[in-house]
Image (cartoon, helix red, strand yellow):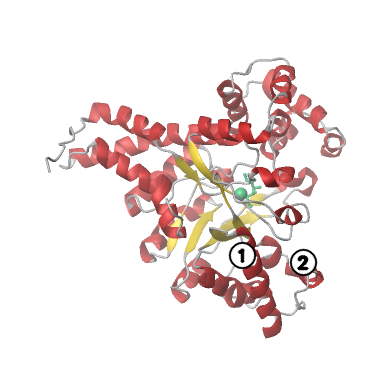
Amino acid sequence: MNQIVEDKLSKQNLVSVVEEELNATQIIDIHTHLYKPSLGAVGLWGIDELVTYHYLEAELFRSDDIAPEKYWALSKREQADLIWRTLFVENPPISEATRGVVAVLQALDLPTEGRDLSEARKFYAGQTLEAHIGKVFRLAGISEAVMTNDPLDPAEAPLWKDSPPHNLFHAVLRLDRVLEKWPEHWQKLQAEGYRVEQNPTPATIAEVRRFLADWCKVMEPVYMAVSLSDDFAFPENSIRAQLLRDAVLPACREFNIPLSLMIGVRRQVNPAIRLAGDGSGKADLRAVENLCREFPQNRFLASLLSRENQHELCVYSRKFANLMPFGCWWFLNNPSIVEEITRERIEMLGMSFIPQHSDARVLEQVIYKWRNTRRTMAPILANSYALLTEDGRPVTREHIRHDLDRLFRKNFQKFCGVAN
Ligand code: HDL
Ligand code: ZN
């Protein structure tokens, strides 16, 4: 067979080829708070949701002297008008989150310098959710989005009855209410017919297993997930550790799916600003070390909230093949930090990690979050290939295409057992 000899790329054209191939790569967004259309009642989309995203609310409270409780008393529309005026008209939208809204408006051919949101609201009045989802995914360059689905969320759970699968979305079984808030939620399982009590007796553990299995059959999740506080420890003498060891990890093995550990949140450091009130703390990663070593049959996705935990996560990922680091999560999803995290991951892990997820809570955020990722990652990847070329190994477009496919698709598909 005549081997097509790919032209070896010079350092100069590495950046343009990486940019081209990044733009051509259809990314799988492995962690979002988006929902398939049949769960649309709990999904957020449109200009008022985009402008009142909790990142922007936090920035409003720094730029305007409105008291939070006065802000909460406003309607969603009045909140959006206040944020638009304060962060976009009276001040340049220079932060990551405000610039993101500008990028979305530009991508949708909507005015980015308007004195108000009237044009955007007129555009949205004519949109239907399903068609808009397809357009937004195309603009973002993503082929699928992985959801966050909480079976104990009273707003979401009932919507799963007769909810059909959707080719653009994968489900995830989210376990915060089971693992982090068991005392407040065990009676919800009891009310649904699971014979549980607050103490994790063997009978209770078996019923939690049945609960997890029932929802795995309904949702067909690609992984289970939990957001854990910065003081998470394992092993520890706690209901959380016992439910994790005796119910959740065996269930992950039973359904052959990973558990995603998102560690480092310090919940509600400022309750007055509600969803915007969570903070970040450095975690003790010996918990991750112990889990990976003691449960080699389990696979763990891991995303940590503290910048100070990132390098040791790379070291642990070199020790455990059942540990897959992913994303630059939440407060880390800023170009200055994404660059540092991604460079140390490439240096220590090659292309055996998942570089990013959008964490989008409002549909249109995937447009700016993936534009930023491509823009930030292109020079980092080009630099890695330039170093390889300088050290004696020429790089071709095919090599780059292969690596991007691994980073943004295959590593997830293989680790979670998802078909291409
Ligand atoms: O727990 C999580 O999945 C976090 O991503 C939170 O949703 C966080 O509040 C968030 O929205 N980050 O963007
Ligand atoms: Zn999230």
Q: Can residue 312 be seen in this view?
A: no
User: Residue 241, which numbered label?
Assistant: none
- Crowding near pointer 1: few (<14 within 10 Å), some, many (20+)? few
Of pointers 2 and 1, the one earlier in the residue sequence: 2
Please give the residue where the numbered disc 1 appears in the rendered image: 217
The x, y position of residue 231, in whole percent, is 62, 64
Q: Which of 329 and 413 is in front in this view?
A: 413
Quarter of the image for residue 384 reads top left
**Label 2 is placed on what type of residue?**
His
Residue 198 location in percent, x, y? 77, 76
Q: In this view, does 77 lie to the left or right of 257?
A: right
Count of marks, rendered view: 2
Q: Is residue 271 left or right of residue 302?
A: right
The residue carrying mark 1 has its beta carbon less than 8 Å from ligand 1:
no
What residue sits 57% from the left and 72% below the top?
251
Figure quadrant of residue 361:
top right
Amino acid type, mark 1: Lys
Determine whether the residue tagged by mark 1 lies in a helix, strand or loop.
helix
Nearest to the observer: residue 307 or residue 150: 150
Badge 2 density bin: few <14, some 14–19, many ≥20, Cα 10 Å? some
Query: Is 250 situated above or below 143?
Result: below
Q: Is the N terminus in the top left, top right, bottom left or bottom right quadrant?
A: top left
Q: Which mark is residue 185?
A: 2
Q: In this view, does 130 lie above or below 152?
A: above
Residue at 50% over, 36% down:
370
